[in-house]
Image (cartoon, helix red, strand yellow):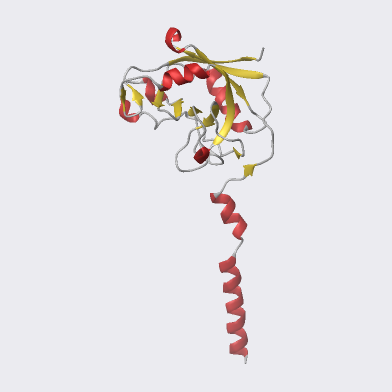
C-alpha cells in the first residue's frame, strides 16, 4: 500500500515538473507585440545627409518613441556620436535600402551586413504598425532581440515584415531619394559597386 502511494506521488511530481509554466517559454521565443497604439511623432527628427547630395539628396525621418523607445534611443544616440558618418547603404533592392553597418566603411564587400556598434543589442519592440512604403525598421538576424545599429527603409508594402521587425519611424521627406538609391547600378548582389555613402545623420527639432 505504501509502495503504491509512493509511486502515485512520484508520478504526480514528475507530471507537474514536465508541464512547467508554458507562458514563460512562449514569451522567451515570441516577443510581445504592441497592438492598437497609434504612433506619435517625437519632437525631433532624423535627417540623413548623403555624401553625394546632388544625386541622392536628404531623407527626413520622424521617430516613434511611444512605439519603440529603445530602438529610437539607440538610433539617436549613435547618430549624435557620429557612428553613422561614412557608412553606406550596403543592401539595396526593390524592397528596402539598408545601412548602418560600420563594416561598410571599408573596401571589403564580403563583410557588409555583419557589423554593429559595441553597445548591447536592443530587444525586440514589435508592434502592429504595418511595413508600408517609408517605414523605418531595425535590422536584425534570426534572433528577434539582435537589433543593434543597422536600419532599413521599406520601399513598398512588405506584409512579411509585419510584427516580425521593430518599426521605429517613417520617412516624411525624401522618399524619392530613397527610391533613387534603390535603383543604383551596377551592384554585386545587393551592394552598389560605387558606395552609396551616408555623410552624416543629424538629429534636429521638427519644424
**What residue is at 40 percent from the left and 26 percent from the top?**
92
Q: Residue at x 46, y 20 (%)?
A: 179
Q: Is residue 109 left or right of residue 138?
A: left
Which of the 4 image quarters holds residue 126?
Answer: top right
Q: Position of residue 45 (x, y in %)?
A: 61, 18
State the residue in front, 96 or 148. 96
Relative to 101, 172 lies left or right: right
189 w.r.t. 141: above or below: above
Residue pictured at 62% horizontal, 80% vertical? 9
User: Dividing the picture into quarters, in which one does residue 42 lie?
Assistant: top right
In this view of the protein, which residue sits in the foreground, 91 or 118? 91
> Residue 157: x and y, percent?
52, 33
| Residue 87 in sight | no
Residue 124, image x and y in percent?
A: 56, 39
Q: Which residue of the protein is positioned furthest toward the bottom in this rendering? A: 1
Taking depth in this image into account, of 19 and 179 the one nearest to the observer is: 179
Q: Position of residue 103 (x, y in %)?
A: 38, 25
Q: Is residue 112 visible?
A: yes
Instruction: For the C terminus, give its image quadrant.
Output: top right
As drawn, the residue found furthest toward the top would be 54
Amino acid at each position: 500500500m505504501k509502495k503504491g502511494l509512493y509511486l502515485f506521488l512520484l508520478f504526480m511530481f514528475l507530471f507537474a515538473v514536465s508541464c512547467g509554466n508554458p507562458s514563460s517559454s512562449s514569451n522567451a521565443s515570441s516577443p510581445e507585440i504592441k497592438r492598437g497604439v497609434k504612433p506619435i511623432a517625437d519632437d525631433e527628427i532624423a535627417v540623413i545627409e548623403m555624401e553625394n547630395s546632388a544625386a541622392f539628396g536628404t531623407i527626413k525621418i520622424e521617430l516613434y518613441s511611444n512605439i519603440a523607445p529603445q530602438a529610437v534611443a539607440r538610433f539617436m544616440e549613435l547618430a549624435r556620436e557620429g557612428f553613422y558618418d561614412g557608412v553606406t547603404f550596403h543592401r539595396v533592392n526593390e524592397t528596402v535600402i539598408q545601412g548602418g553597418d560600420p563594416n561598410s566603411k571599408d573596401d571589403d564587400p564580403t563583410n557588409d551586413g555583419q557589423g554593429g556598434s559595441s553597445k548591447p543589442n536592443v530587444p525586440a519592440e514589435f508592434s502592429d504598425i504595418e511595413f508600408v512604403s517609408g517605414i523605418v525598421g531595425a535590422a536584425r538576424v534570426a534572433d528577434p532581440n539582435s537589433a543593434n545599429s543597422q536600419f532599413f527603409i521599406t520601399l513598398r508594402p512588405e506584409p512579411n515584415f509585419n510584427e516580425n521587425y521593430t518599426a521605429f519611424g517613417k520617412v516624411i521627406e525624401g522618399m524619392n531619394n530613397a527610391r533613387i538609391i534603390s535603383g543604383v547600378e551596377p551592384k554585386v548582389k545587393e551592394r552598389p559597386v560605387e558606395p552609396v555613402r551616408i555623410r552624416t545623420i543629424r538629429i534636429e527639432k521638427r519644424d
